[in-house]
Amino acid sequence: MKLDPKLEQELDATGLPWHTEVGGKHYKIKLAGRLVGVYPKGKVAGPYKRSLLNTITQVRRAAQEIMTQ
């Protein structure tokens, strides 16, 4: 299973435990045991990789919410 390096950096930067599960067409990203986002398998099309940017934003929001609880 290979995630985008930018996404892995964001997950590591949270300082929380994380792991991924393989789904049918997506990777399920769990942060501190909570499902925080899904990331499509295979190459992400487009110059901005919108799905990557959206997933990174989901991870950041969830990490902040988990840390403030």
Image: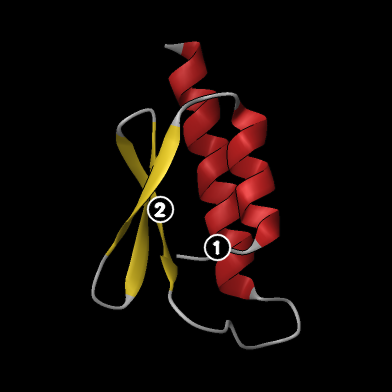
**Mark 2: amino acid:** Gly
Q: Which residue is mark 2?
A: 37
In contact (CB < 8 Å): disc 1 and disc 2 = no
Pinpoint residue 22: horizontal percent, then vertical percent: 30, 63
Secondary structure type for disc 1? loop
Dot 2 alpha-carbon crowd within 10 angstroms: few under 14, some 14 to 19, many 20 or more: some
Q: Position of residue 6 (x, y in %)?
A: 70, 56
The structure residue drawn at horizontal position 52% and vertical position 30%, both measured from the top left corner, is 63
Residue at 58% across / 40% down in the picture? 11
Q: Amino acid at mark 1?
A: Leu
In the displayed structure, 45 sits above or below 36; it is below
Crowding at mark 1 (Cα within 10 Å: few <14, some 14-19, many 20+): some
Looking at the image, the residue that sits furthest to the right is 47
Q: Is residue 10 above or below residue 55?
A: above
Q: What is the tally of numbered marks visible in this picture?
A: 2
Residue 48 rendering spot, x and y as whole percentages: 73, 77
Residue 49 horizontal side relative to residue 65, left or right:
right
- Give the residue displayed 50% in from the left and 16% down from the top: 67
Task: Determine whether, in the image, residue 26 is placed left or right of residue 52.
Answer: left
Name the residue tied to disc 1: 3
Residue 2: x percent and y percent?
52, 66
Q: Toward the viewer: 48 or 20?
A: 20
| Residue placed most toward the observer, 35 or 50 | 35
Q: Identify the secondary structure beneath mark 2.
A: strand
Q: Residue at x 61, y 49 (%)?
A: 8
